[in-house]
Image (tube, grey):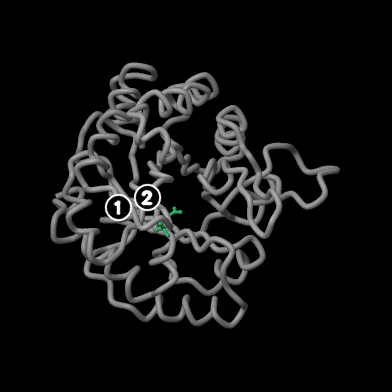
């Protein structure tokens, strides 16, 4: 499908980011419960669903997960296979049939402190753009995360921060590449802090990102690129969030580890969306 300039063409897309959680047994249980759960709408026709297990469980989840759901990786290494101890090159993911990767998640952009020492990857927006480019070059689709920290939100510089994060992407991706990219807006300040972004705050940023795509990529890209909300999404707020005109999906963290909550988020989309293609 090419970039089409129509709201209805933006099929709702829900990612389940399982982060660094799970055992072989708990993965099997989660997958079994997801497989047995009832979907009120057709996937992938009405809604796209992609689950992102930790790398070590990718094969297992690929084998076991219901075929309507896709499987993606939580990151990729943007170099060809070679002497990169501990890394997972995009090409390896593509070779094993993985079709999606998250890049630039706020937890990878952070350089934080935990247990009395510094941890984290400290990925820059340039790194993220290189990874997005690499995903596209290897035939993967990328969920590219952007979002501001609490300091920026409180200082009123959210849009400036997003502009800086998006800039390298505009340089790294040609217009046609955006067909393979989904943006995920993650207000880092609303994750694990007890602070909640309202649907209106989310919609305001999504509208900004869409206009940014129109101005910096093309009118068509602005209309066609899907923008997911990646703040805390659960079965209680999903319906209101997805009724917002510029929210085209969710990147769900914690709630995606609970089959019942995740399925209920997926099913909640039905009540507010015009079925795609009808
Ligand atoms: P959360 O995580 O839903 O647990 O807030 C979202 C994310 O990290 O993508």
Q: Quadrant of residue 66?
A: bottom left
Q: Nearer the viewer, residue 50 or 74?
A: 74
Quadrant observed for ligand 1 in the rendered image: bottom left
Please tell me which residue is depicted at 26% across the width and 66% down the height of the picture.
235
Q: Is residue 92 left or right of residue 189?
A: right
Where does the N terminus fall, quadrant-wise? Answer: top left
**Residue located 39% across and 23% down the image:** 160
Viewer-nearest residue: 161 or 97:
161
x, y percentage for residue 180? 45, 37
Farthest residue to the right: give it: 83
Q: Are marks 1 and 2 in contact (CB under 8 Å)?
A: yes
Residue under the point 34% across and 19% down: 218
| SS at badge 2 | helix
Residue 94: x percent and y percent? 62, 49
Whole-percent x, y for residue 167 in the image: 48, 21
Image: 265 above or below 10: below
From the image, tell me which residue sits under label 2: 190
In the rendered image, residue 49, in percent from the top left (x then y), is placed at 38, 58
**Is ligand 1 less than 8 Å from the beta carbon at label 2?**
yes
> Of helix, strand and loop, which one carries label 1?
loop
Extreme top residue here? Answer: 215
Label annotation for residue 196:
1
- Which numbered disc covers residue 76? none
Q: Earlier in the sequence, mark 1 or mark 2?
A: 2
115 or 104, which lies in front?
A: 115
């Amino acid at each position: 499908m090419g970039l089409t300039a129509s709201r209805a063409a933006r099929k709702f897309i829900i990612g389940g980011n399982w982060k660094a959680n799970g055992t072989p047994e708990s993965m099997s249980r989660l997958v079994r419960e997801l497989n047995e759960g009832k979907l009120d709408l057709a996937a992938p026709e009405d809604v796209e669903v992609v689950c992102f297990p930790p790398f070590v469980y990718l094969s297992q989840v690929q084998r076991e997960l219901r075929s309507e759901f896709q499987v993606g990786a939580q990151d990729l290494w943007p170099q060809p296979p070679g002497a990169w101890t501990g890394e997972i090159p995009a090409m390896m993911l593509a070779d094993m049939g993985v079709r999606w990767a998250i890049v630039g998640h706020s937890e990878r952009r952070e350089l934080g402190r935990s247990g009395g020492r510094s941890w984290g990857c400290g990925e820059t927006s340039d790194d993220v753009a290189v990874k997005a480019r690499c995903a596209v070059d290897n035939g993967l689709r990328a969920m590219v995360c952007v979002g501001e920290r609490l300091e920026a939100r409180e200082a009123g510089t959210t849009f400036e921060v997003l502009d800086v994060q998006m800039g390298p992407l505009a340089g790294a991706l040609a217009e046609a590449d955006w067909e393979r990219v989904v943006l995920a807006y993650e207000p880092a300040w609303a994750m694990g802090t007890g602070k909640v972004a309202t649907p209106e705050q989310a919609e305001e940023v999504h509208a900004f990102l869409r206009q940014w795509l129109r101005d910096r990529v093309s009118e068509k890209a602005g209309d066609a690129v899907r923008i997911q909300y990646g703040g805390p999404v659960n079965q209680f707020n999903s319906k209101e969030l997805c009724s917002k005109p510029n929210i085209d999906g969710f990147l769900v963290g914690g709630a995606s580890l609970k089959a019942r909550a995740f399925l209920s988020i997926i099913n909640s989309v039905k009540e507010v969306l015009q079925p795609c293609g009808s």
